[in-house]
Amino acid sequence: MTESLIIGIGSGNPAKVKAVEAGARSSGLDTVQIVSYNVPSGVRPQPINDEETKAGALNRAAACVKEGADIGIGLEGGVMQMEDGMYLCNWGALTDRSGKTFTAGGARIKLPDFIADGLQAGSELGQLMAALTEDADVRKKEGAIGIFTSRLVNRDEMFVHIALMLFGQYEYSLQEKQS
């Protein structure tokens, strides 16, 4: 990847921006320009399954490229129901100007029943977490993953792994093309 690239992140959320910046640094892209774009996910405010959460990430990544980025990154958090309860899920997508697209999913943890009940009643996870922590900006900091892991894993760290998987897939595709 060249260092004159503009990498767009489809969010102004500090945890997501921090994750993309850390992923870019770890990928050797510490001199690229990273621009935050306030673009819509195109899905419900509270994605309720993997498919919808992944679609939100894909939509955000594509929207960044439409806004002028060379590479768009979309990161989306959501929830998913499984047989034993509701889980936190998260997805990322990377799209470049040529239309290459890569996706990656991340960690999952089971949410406490009282949070799952609130989600099933129509609340958003961010609202529930803000009420629980009495911090309206918890989604911009440690997030639900940070609260429910006693801050051993925070939201930006969770998304760093996804950003690294996206940058790694992209880099691999460029190397593969050269061989």
Image (cartoon, helix red, strand yellow):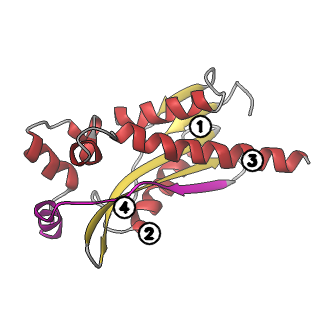
* Mark 1 and mark 3: Cα distance apart in space: 24 Å
In the picture, the disc for residue 172 is 3
Q: Toward which corner of the image does residue 30 lie, by quadrant?
A: top right
Question: Residue 46, how many percent across, how many down?
Answer: 27, 59
In the picture, the disc for residue 43 is 4
Instruction: Look at label 1 and name its amino acid.
Output: Gly
Q: Toward which corner of the image does residue 134 lie, by quadrant?
A: top left
Q: Which numbered disc flags the more N-terminal residue, 3 or 2?
A: 2
Label 1 or label 4, whichever lies nearer to me, is: 4
Disc 1 target residue: 68
26 or 137, nearer to the observer: 26
In the picture, the disc for residue 51 is 2
Label 4 or label 3, whichever lies nearer to me, is: 3
Q: Which numbered disc flags the more N-terminal residue, 2 or 4?
A: 4
Q: Which numbered disc flags the more N-terminal residue, 4 or 3?
A: 4
Magenta region: which residues? Answer: 101-122
Instruction: Look at label 4 and name its amino acid.
Output: Val
Q: Residue furthest right?
A: 179
Q: Which numbered disc flags the more N-terminal residue, 1 or 4?
A: 4
